[in-house]
Image (spheres, rainbow, N blue to C red):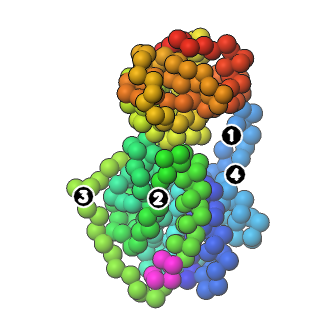
């Protein structure tokens, strides 16, 4: 099929690479986000999709406005059979969606209708899900509401964080997408409407949601920590500085004493903090204006002791 690919991040890049390497498909162009400043030094950085496209001599389009008529004319002249959209970061207009011969599809990182929105991987973890997955949908003008073409479940383990779960999706996504593209090309698919009664949302992340409430259940805090890796991070305060908690482990309830936020024990692989119910072993941290480190090094360098209470 003749495909125009829309995407920006590394998951999109992995899927784009699979399409390019698959005989029978031709990627006519890649549409990706404009180059933007990134990092502490604000260096102008291109997306992973753009970098791959340039290396493989694929035309790149980076419109500031999806309603721009010059951009739409370029898309129309390409004569695509299908638009494939993965983590592009913008909602396609109705005019753009009408251009491909077949339709436009989106690979979304959840089992829709659960976790519609910008951060499905993160919110699945924050909410303690044991399973998520990938969905390919026919794109509709409303965000993530299109009919489902196919889905693939992916298990979530208790120590998975957002980085690990995304790696699982990067591993499963390309093969799953190629199978779906084959079915679309051969007409061997059936569109299924999403169940509106099962909708949940996955809005953009913000720094504010990362502040740890130690009165919550230890499992809920553990889920928050792993869901906010690598950004914005779950955090508490140590001596008036933000302390990001990067890795935790739920431990058996052998520490019944203490109040929420209190350090109950200092062990060789971290320190134990009391939650509203249960306790957590903190294994890795990042103190503001410092570097990330294992909890043992943090304890040694800051003389953290039993009885200290995080705010």
Any magenta on residue 225?
Answer: no
Figure check: 293 above or below 108: above
Residue range in magenta is: 179-184
Disc nearer the start of the sequence (4/2): 4
What whole-number distance in Å separates the C-alpha atoms at marks 4 and 3? 37 Å
Secondary structure under tag 4 reads: loop
Q: Which residue ends up furthest to the front in the rendered image?
A: 254
Residue beneath the point at 45% across and 81% down: 184
Residue beneath the point at 70% across and 65% down: 53
Crowd class of label 1 (few under 14; some 14 to 19; many from 20; radius 10 Å): few
Q: Which residue ends up furthest to the left in the rendered image?
A: 197
Which dot marks residue 46?
Answer: 4
Choose mark 2 or mark 1, whichever is in front: 2
Disc nearer the start of the sequence (4/3): 4
Residue beneath the point at 58% across and 69% down: 174
What whole-number distance in Å separates the C-alpha atoms at marks 1 and 3? 38 Å
What whole-number distance in Å separates the C-alpha atoms at marks 4 and 2? 32 Å
Which dot marks residue 196?
Answer: 3
């Amino acid at each position: 099929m003749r495909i125009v690919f829309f995407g920006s991040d590394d998951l999109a890049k992995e899927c784009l690479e699979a399409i390019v390497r698959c005989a029978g498909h031709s990627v006519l162009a890649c549409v990706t986000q404009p180059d933007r400043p990134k990092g502490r030094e604000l260096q102008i950085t291109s997306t992973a999709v753009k970098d791959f496209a340039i290396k493989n001599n694929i035309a790149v389009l980076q419109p500031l406005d999806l309603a721009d008529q010059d951009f739409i004319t370029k898309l129309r002249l390409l004569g695509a059979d299908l638009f494939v959209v993965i983590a592009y970061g913008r909602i396609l207009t109705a005019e753009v969606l009408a251009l491909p011969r077949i339709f436009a599809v989106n690979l979304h990182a959840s089992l829709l209708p659960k976790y519609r929105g910008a951060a499905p991987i993160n919110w699945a973890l924050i909410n303690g899900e044991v399973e998520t997955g990938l969905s390919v949908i026919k794109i509709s003008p409303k965000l993530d509401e299109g009919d489902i073409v196919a889905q693939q479940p992916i298990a979530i383990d208790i120590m998975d964080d957002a980085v690990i779960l995304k790696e699982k999706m990067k591993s499963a996504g390309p093969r799953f997408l190629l199978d779906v593209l084959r079915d679309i090309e051969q007409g061997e698919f059936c569109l299924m409407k999403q169940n509106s009664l099962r909708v949940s949302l996955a809005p953009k992340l913000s720094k504010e949601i990362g502040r740890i409430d130690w009165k919550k259940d230890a499992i809920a805090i553990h889920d928050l920590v792993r869901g906010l890796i690598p950004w914005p991070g779950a955090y508490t305060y140590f001596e008036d500085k933000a302390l990001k908690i990067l890795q935790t482990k739920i431990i058996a309830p052998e520490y019944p004493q203490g109040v929420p936020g209190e350090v109950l024990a200092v062990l060789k692989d971290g320190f134990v903090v009391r939650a509203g119910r249960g306790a957590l072993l903190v294994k890795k941290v990042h103190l503001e204006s410092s570097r990330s480190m294992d909890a043992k090094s943090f304890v040694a360098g800051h003389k953290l002791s039993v009885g200290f209470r995080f705010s």
